[in-house]
Image (cartoon, rainbow, N blue to C red):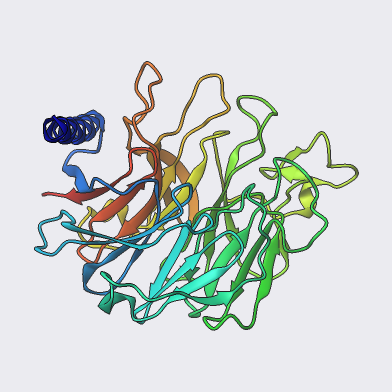
Amino acid sequence: MKIFAFFLAMLAATQAIGAAEADKQQVLRQLQLPVGFKISLFASDVPNARSLALGDQGVIYVGTRQQGAVYALQDVDHDGVAERRYELAKGLYMPNGVAYRNNQLFVAETNRILRFDNIGDNLANPPKPVVVYDRLPSDKHHGWKYLRFGPDGKLYTSVGAPCNICNPDKEIYTSLVRLNVDGSGFEILARGIRNTVGFDWRPGSDALFFTENGRDYLGDDVPPDELNRWSEKGQHFGYPYCHAGSIADPELAGDRRCDEFVAPEWKFKAHMAPLGLRFYSGKQFPKRFHNQLLVAQHGSWNRSKPHGYRIALVKFKNNKPYKEQAFISGWLTETDEVLGRPTDILQLPDGSLLIADDTLGVIYRVEYQK
């Protein structure tokens, strides 16, 4: 009887996995893309997939927030599907951010940055991480971090506000920061940034563009979320005194004026929750996408009628954004059912894109077919 019960349990588990895979394929069929584009599942078992980084030999590194794990994915036969998944670490403190360079994987936890050496050669048996920097605040609220290498070879990350709306008493909060790969040279580049979980450099320039999620509980449509541009050390982007360049905070503005701060380059609708973003620099997509910005809009949680849940295309002209439109939609149905929530975007060497979805626990692959 015990053996029979075991096989029944195994059958039920197999059926559940099959049903879950069928559900994910059903989500794919709901997604809408421009003519000529195709979306598929690159990996379908990556719980709480958040940030993405490209390693050598096509290895994809994935950070998580709620899961506490870091993964590596490998498409061994180059068919556009990752056959192998490695769990490189678990039990970490919201290891959202990942960045890769020279066979080293850097992981941003809430309160520290770790480094895994020779990682590409040891995916099945990863080494213990080395602590690069451990003097970041440990607040859970907006504590998850994005991590990227800049054009200067330094690591960039941010420290969010430990609240919805407040004026933190330590300079490190609401900041964009960078440091050397060995943990030295830590510096604050800008302040007044409530929470950014995505940034990228516009090709051909040193201009760093980053998304910012606006404060909550001012209403369905206030304040707009932001796309900002950092260009010089010491800039202040307004939080908590001013939102979206023109909205004084009713609680904390005091006598501070919005024209004292750097205004956003573009305003998204309120509560869209823009996260990861990438300027497209590949050659696979049509020319109209070259150097244009793709943004993962995670979607609203505190709005009477939800919106977002899409990949947006922000079009640029003369180095300035001027238009926003949907590139991929369908994760939010007409009946307001949420099928998935995109979090980050990664461009592959062949010009295709990977998109992480932390709710469905998958990585999508988007390609253009002429």
Q: Is residue 353 left or right of residue 214?
A: left
Which residue shows up at 83% across the image and 46% down it? 257
Corner quadrant of residue 102: bottom left
Which residue shows up at 73% across the image and 68% down it? 234
Q: Is residue 181 left or right of residue 16?
A: right
Counting every numbered tag in the picture gives 0
Q: Residue 202, can we see it?
A: no
Q: Is residue 177 above or below residue 191?
A: below
Which residue shows up at 54% across the image and 76% down it? 131
Q: Is residue 249 left or right of residue 58?
A: right
Question: Looking at the figure, which quarter contains the N terminus?
Answer: top left
Residue 208 coordinates in the image, percent (x, y): 53, 64
Residue 216 coordinates in the image, percent (x, y): 66, 34
Residue 213 coordinates in the image, percent (x, y): 59, 44
Camera-side residue: 53 or 276?
53
Camera-side residue: 176 or 318?
176
Residue 353 coordinates in the image, percent (x, y): 27, 54
Corner quadrant of residue 262: bottom right
Q: Residue furthest right?
A: 255
Q: Residue 343, can we see it?
A: yes
Camera-side residue: 190 or 6?
6
Q: Residue furthest front?
A: 1
Camera-side residue: 320 or 176?
176
Q: Residue furthest top?
A: 335
